[in-house]
Amino acid sequence: MTIDAADLKRMFDAIAVAIEADKDRLCQLDGVIGDADHGIAMALGFGAVRDALASLDLATTEPTTLLNMAAKSFLNAVGASSGPLYATAFMRGAAAVKGKATLAAGDVIAIVQAMAQGIKDRGKAEIGEKTMIDAWLPAAEAAAAANLAGKNLAQSLEAALAAAERGAEATKDMIAAKGRSSRLGERSLGHMDPGAASAVTVIGAMTVSLG
Amino acid sequence: MQTKKIINDGNRAVDEMLEGILAAHPRHLKSADGSPRSIIARDGPRPGKVGLVIGGGSGHEPTFLGFVGKGLADAAAIGNVFASPPPDPILECAKAVSGGAGVLFMYGNYAGDVMNFDMAAEMAAMDDIEVRTVLTTDDVASAPHDQRHKRRGVAGNFFIFKAAGAACDRMLSLNEVERIARKANDHTFTMGVALSPCSLPQTRRPNFEIGADEMEIGMGIHGEPGIARAKLKTADEITDEMLDKIFAEMAPSRGDKVAVLVNSLGSTPLMELYIMNRRIRQRLDAIGVSIHATWVGNYCTSLEMAGASVTLMHLDGELQTMLDHPCDCAMFRAG
């Protein structure tokens, strides 16, 4: 199976719906160790992406163009931390499939890997610092490993989702070292990082939509 | 239960506030063409002058845009509530205030602000605008002394921006402005205390829980947890606790001078701020430190949070000159 711009648009629509439904939980998670706006920012960002993509002529749009448009609309609607992080993710994803009219499973996996690397480069976070990277990096690695082992796209994305869920769960046992909660020290223990939690929601919607 | 607010639509709160501010302060402020979240001083930016761009999330009014005007900041980039502005409005601010002598970005040290302002600085460089950045890190409670670079910027922004804005207005070079801005930050120390939470216009839910008889020392201006929860104490005890932390770092000597800022986080009234200020005066008198100037009121708020912060700026001759330099902004005047 191949993925085209229309499939990617449906994926972003699915993410917008999933994040909107998850908004209150994300704000509550953020309220415990941050400033309580993470769900708002994510919903605003993916809502803006959905609105921007609605104006595209999908028949003549390449995946790279669509992903760059998603990046710009997310960034300008949000700012905050999630704006630059997800905008960089989508721009790197766009660059990873430049020139392709449709995407094979390996290309989608390449997008996921580029997104994770983009978030890591922009936020300068490492594994174990209690950020969205603790969900995104293992997810990208699991997707790549599954793809390499001959799994199909759905199975590879399911592997990514499972890894993201484990990663997000593991943030409960981490002391924040990056981002707003990093000034809390040990008081951040026991709470899931909201950025990792929303990463699971995003990857989950991608999995359902593309798998 | 939702908190009570006088708003129309939580998602429109920032833009409707900006409309109201521009309507109230037409002599001082305008928005950049095509960029309503870029608020520019009508008087201030001029050829040969370093442009000062400040900014950050909304919800801290009069920080940031209230400090835009002649003698202080040339522009402020406005984000959503408690969220950094994206790069575009920051870039538009930089373009609007660039007088060919460079632009200084100043804002509180938060991960989101750093990413967005850095992206804007990279974009400005492509337009041949030289941008330098000085982060404010005055919140003593937010990291140990040896990790000052990790600290948050809070109400002390006011002193630090004031000093940098004066340096710009006196037509000093970008190097000099940057030096003075860094010195101002190094000399500024803030401690806060929160008594009750704020709520975002979009959620109208208290953004943290605190007992009816509790206070939190060191809480950030977005409701980030502080360093300790305790039973609510008297004004003198609270002020002493805050000053002890500040004095330990500032290490004032007899004969030194300071500027004092007693700031409400939103709903704490002037009465309580002045009670705190009375104690600050007593404590400074006791160690032989004189007060050059005092400001009391709402300077850096956190929506309707109850609580206050105390900021001391440890003055030398240069910083005193910068604080005394006249400025005329929408929500602040001096000299």
Image: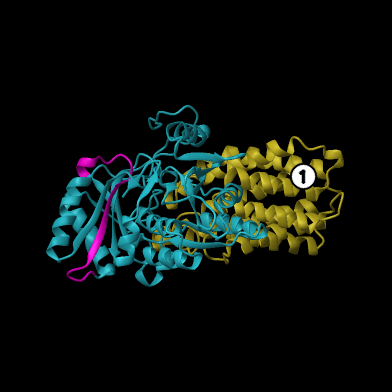
Region of the chain picked out in magenta, as a range: B252-272
| Residue B54 sits inside the magenta stretch | no
Residue at position x 79%, y 64% in the image:
A148
Work out whether residue B315 or residue B260 is closer to the camera in this orientation and state it.
Answer: B315
Image height of A21 relative to A154, above or below: above
Horizontal arrangement in the rendering, residue A210 relative to residue B294 (left or right): right
The spot of residue B105 in percent (x, y) is 51, 57
SS of the residue under disc 1: helix
Instruction: Tell me which corner region of the image, top left, top right, bottom left or bottom right, holds residue A123.
Output: bottom right
The spot of residue B275 in percent (x, y) is 17, 47
Residue at position x 41%, y 65% in the image:
B180
Query: Total of numbered circles in the picture?
Result: 1
Instruction: Tell me which corner region of the image, top left, top right, bottom left or bottom right, holds residue A107.
Output: bottom right
The spot of residue B109 in percent (x, y) is 46, 59
What is the drawing colour of chain B?
cyan
Q: Which residue is mark 1?
A: A8
Image height of A52 relative to A199, above or below: above
Work out whether residue A78 or residue B320 is closer to the camera in this orientation and state it.
Answer: B320
Q: Chain of mark 1?
A: A
Local packing at callout 1 (Cα closer than 10 Å; few below 14, some 14-19, many 20+) is many
Q: Which chain is yellow?
A: A
| Residue A45 visible to an observer of this rendering | yes
Work out whether residue B170 or residue B109 is closer to the camera in this orientation and state it.
Answer: B170
| Residue B143 visible to an observer of this rendering | no
Instruction: Tell me which corner region of the image, top left, top right, bottom left or bottom right, holds residue B247.
Output: bottom left
